[in-house]
Amino acid sequence: MSLNKEKRRVVITGMGVVSPFGQGTDCLINNILAGNCSIKVDEEIRDRQDVSCFLSSKVPTLDYSDIASQKIRFMSNMSLFAYRAVEEAITNAGFVSGLPPEKTALFLGSTTSSYISWIDNVLKYTERRMDKFTTDNLFNIMNHTALVNVAHSFKLKWSGVGANTACSTGVINTGYAYLAIKEGIFDNALCGGTEEFHVIMLGLFNHMTAVSDKFNDDPNKSCRPFDANRCGIVCAEGCGMLFLETLDSALSRNVKIYGEIVGFGTNTEINNMSYSSKSSIKECMSLALENANLDASEIDFVNAHATGTIVGDAEEAQSIGEIFGDNVWTNSLKGYIGHTMAASGSIELIAILKMMENGKFAGTLNLENVDAKCSGIKHFSGVKNLKVTTFIKNSLALGGSNASLIVRKIAGNNILGGKCDERRNY
């Protein structure tokens, strides 16, 4: 397919979420703005002696009885979450048939495939019962299990690809979809990340001394981004999916536009596998600003990745401070829902889009005493009424895969505020 000579404007017109609060975008944003926290003591792991954190943030039981048995047999939780999120995103984008346009690309990934299916296979292997392997488990352990399940369920026969870059998966997939549509490779796309919880993931972070283990008796206080008393992450699960298309397409369909993606940056930390350094995060945000042709002064809001880890939060805060100073309101949403890993970027992006829509922004939960190493940026708690037209969303991953996405509010055919009013294509 040949590329368009003229760069196209890319907008977000559909959003779907499955979060630890439940199903739906409204469920997510209403609980966040109410100051609720979905983190709980996990009864399945509280008596284990091999981990120090007994908390998790899981999706409540949902009804999947409407999904055909021949489809659901190949779906673990991450695929089921993605199914529901895609379903909502398609409807939200105005496709009443329940299916997107035929030539819709799909960008979807996860941190790993299904741990439950892997464990089942390993047990059969160690017990010399490999003759009892099932086809279901094969399709559940593929790296792209969620992607193919969604593609088959929603008849997405166009390109299906996806980054599986741990915690930056959702934003990287959204950024790649944006670039592909902007360059004319695709006309529209579904994009995001999905994740299912398993205690093994918690155990791995526990080994890295990166889990929150000082608040087992007070789960609501356990995840504390930027706070002086933070002690680590709380593992969570869910899925966030967005529908992207050209501005011209959205205007012709007369559908609601949540925002226009105007910049994307991604890079890799190469000096440390466990966390991204201040310099690499700063470079990533700078790449996004350069891609958008924007100055730092034109950003109104920063949604940080900040997970509640000692080093990671400090590195990100300092990078934000070096670019934006203390002039731009900054929050992290991990305190409300925990760290949904591959889904975190897309779930949080959707939450910020909803906040920009209604002008009400939730601050960082449990930020009671800002750590000195996280100071120098514009923190806040509670809910503030803010006029935000341009924000940057960060996602950072183990191994060093960083991503920053810039989104602007749009009205009709004009971006609100800033230099972008003067340009039709970029």
Image (tube, helix red, strand yellow):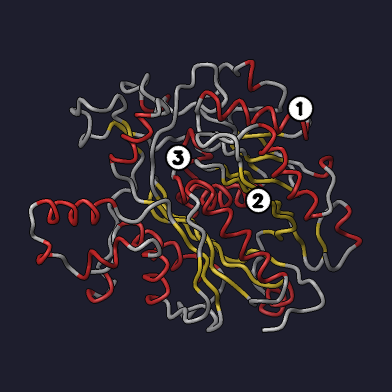
Q: Which dot, 1 or 2, sits closer to the camera? A: 2
Instruction: State the residue at coordinates (70%, 72%).
Output: 246
Discs 2/3, front: 2
Which SS class for mark 2?
strand
Mark 2 neighbour class, 10 Å CA radius: few under 14, some 14 to 19, many 20 or more: many
Q: Tell me residue 195's x, y (percent).
A: 39, 52
Q: Which mark is residue 339?
A: 3
Task: Give left or right: position of 224 versus 236.
Answer: right
Q: Position of residue 357 (x, y in %)?
A: 66, 52
Indicate which disc, 2 or 3, sits on the residue closer to the N terminus: 2
Task: Name the quarter where the N terminus is drawn.
Answer: bottom right
* Residue holding disc 2: 266
Discs 1, 3 touching: Cβ within 8 Å: no
Q: Could you say whether the residue bearing mark 3 is in a helix, strand or loop?
A: loop
State the separation of the CA atoms marked 1 and 2. Answer: 24 Å
Question: Relative to 394, is 120 on the left or the right?
Answer: left
Secondary element type, mark 1: loop
Residue 417, given in percent of the width and then of the height, sits at 85, 52
The part of the image, by quadrant, that contains residue 80 is bottom left
Within 10 Å of the Cα at label 3, are there few (<14), some (14-19), or many (20+) other Cα atoms?
A: many
Q: Amino acid at mark 3?
A: His
The one nearer the camera, 94 or 99, is 99
Task: Give residue 11's quadrant in the image.
Answer: bottom right
Along the polypeptide, which appears first: circle 1 or circle 2? 2
Residue 91 visible in the picture: no
Q: Earlier in the sequence, mark 1 or mark 3?
A: 1
Amino acid type at circle 2 is Thr
Instruction: Name the residue carrying label 1.
Output: 326
